[in-house]
């Protein structure tokens, strides 16, 4: 299966239309999962953010080739383009809310860092007695009730509910990813710009100096800012993105390892295999066999 053959949907099983019809789409997990025998096959969304909350039951979510256990209280953030699939236990229920990319950008016009911080998948384990779970469950239930109505001001109400759901996940992301001390003003913005540059150029194997020059900062400053904000070195950010793409190809395509190496910008497949094994602990072929 080629990478292009992984289907891209608006909502799972529904091909893309001209525009997302509402500010927010929300449904119960059971309503769609029962139609597919509790198995949501590998897919991605081109321009759609999704937010999940498990209220009962559980299962497994595979996100970019990595498995995550789902249990009551699990919340999942799924940005566009990331390949994901679900294996739900029968009877699992909860909520899945969907917000179009353009709509999310508009919601966070006043928060420059929010969009970047919502562009990485995340899984949050909450207890059913946690205040954070009760808050999110209440917001999603209210949104579901409003979505089912056909009353005046529906789009205004759905926009407000979309903002509350996205805001909950943004705050949860900040809490989960924050260092012991918050980053200084401007650091998150620089890291966000760096991540965007890496996303565009990681296959070109540009040296860190090229990224720093493009961002108008020194290499030490960029590295220090990444460590303070993400807990990772700048080089690690680049390598992690390359590894993510390598895992996607190994799990979701049948491309030979040598072809994957060339697709990721490596001129020597043997060097790619060493690069991958040093970070994953296994050779690419062994990783594929175990996936």
Image (tube, rainbow, N blue to C red):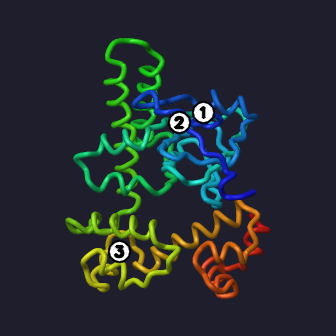
Q: Position of residue 222 (x, y in %)?
A: 31, 79
Label 1 element class: helix
Q: Residues within 10 Å of mark 1 (few under 14, many from 20)?
A: many
Mark 1 or mark 2, which is nearer the start of the sequence?
1
Would you say the residues marked 2 and 3 are in contact, meaning their CB atoms lie under 8 Å apart? no
Q: Position of residue 61 (x, y in %)?
A: 63, 50
Q: Position of residue 86 (x, y in %)?
A: 66, 46
Question: Residue 226 got which mark?
Answer: 3
Q: Residue 286: name its quadrant.
A: bottom right
Would you say the residues marked 2 and 1 are in contact, meaning their CB atoms lie under 8 Å apart? yes
Mark 3 or mark 2, which is nearer the start of the sequence?
2
Mark 2–mark 3 distance (CA, rounded to whole Å):
32 Å
Q: Residue at x 42, y 37 (%)?
A: 136
Q: Is 257 situated left or right of 9 in this image? A: right
Mark 2–mark 1 distance (CA, rounded to whole Å):
6 Å
Q: Residue at x 71, y 30 (%)?
A: 34
Q: Residue 116: name its quadrant.
A: bottom left
Mark 1–mark 3 distance (CA, rounded to whole Å):
36 Å
- Residue at the front extreme? 18
Question: Residue 96 got which mark?
Answer: 2
Q: Is 213 situated left or right of 9 in this image? A: left
Label 3 element class: helix
Q: Residues within 10 Å of mark 2 (few under 14, many from 20)?
A: many
Q: Quadrant of the N terminus?
A: bottom right
Mark 1 lies on residue? 29
- Residue at the top extreme? 151
Task: Work out whether 172 lies above or below 202.
Answer: above
Q: Position of residue 97 (x, y in %)?
A: 49, 35
Q: Which one is in front, 53 or 7?
A: 7
Q: Residue at x 30, y 41 (%)?
A: 106
Q: Residues within 10 Å of mark 3 (few under 14, many from 20)?
A: many
Total residue callouts:
3
């Amino acid at each position: 299966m080629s990478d292009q053959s992984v289907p891209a949907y608006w909502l799972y099983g529904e091909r893309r239309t001209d525009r997302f019809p509402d500010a927010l789409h929300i449904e119960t997990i059971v309503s769609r999962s029962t139609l597919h025998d509790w198995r949501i096959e590998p897919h991605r969304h081109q321009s759609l953010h999704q937010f999940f909350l498990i209220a009962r039951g559980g299962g497994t979510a595979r996100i970019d080739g990595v498995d995550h256990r789902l249990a009551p209280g699990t919340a999942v953030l799924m940005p566009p383009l990331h390949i994901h699939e679900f294996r739900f236990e029968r009877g699992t229920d909860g909520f899945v809310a969907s917000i179009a990319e353009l709509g999310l950008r508009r919601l966070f016009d006043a928060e420059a860092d929010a969009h970047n911080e919502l562009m990485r998948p995340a899984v949050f384990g909450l207890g059913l007695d946690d205040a954070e779970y009760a808050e999110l469950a209440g917001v999603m239930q209210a949104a579901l009730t409003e979505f089912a109505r056909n009353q005046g001001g529906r789009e205004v109400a759905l926009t407000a509910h979309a903002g509350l759901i996205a805001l909950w996940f943004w705050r949860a992301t900040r809490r989960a990813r924050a260092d012991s001390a918050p980053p200084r003003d401007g650091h998150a913005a620089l890291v966000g710009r760096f991540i965007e540059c890496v996303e565009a150029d990681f296959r070109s194997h540009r040296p860190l100096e090229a990224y720093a020059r493009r961002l108008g900062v020194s290499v030490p400053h960029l590295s220090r800012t990444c460590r303070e904000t993400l807990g990772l070195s700048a080089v690690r950010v680049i390598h992690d993105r390359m590894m993510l793409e390598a895992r996607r190809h190994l799990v979701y395509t049948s491309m030979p390892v040598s072809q994957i190496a060339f697709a990721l910008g490596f001129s020597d497949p043997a060097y790619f295999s060493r690069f991958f094994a040093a970070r994953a602990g296994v050779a690419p072929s062994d990783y594929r066999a175990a996936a």
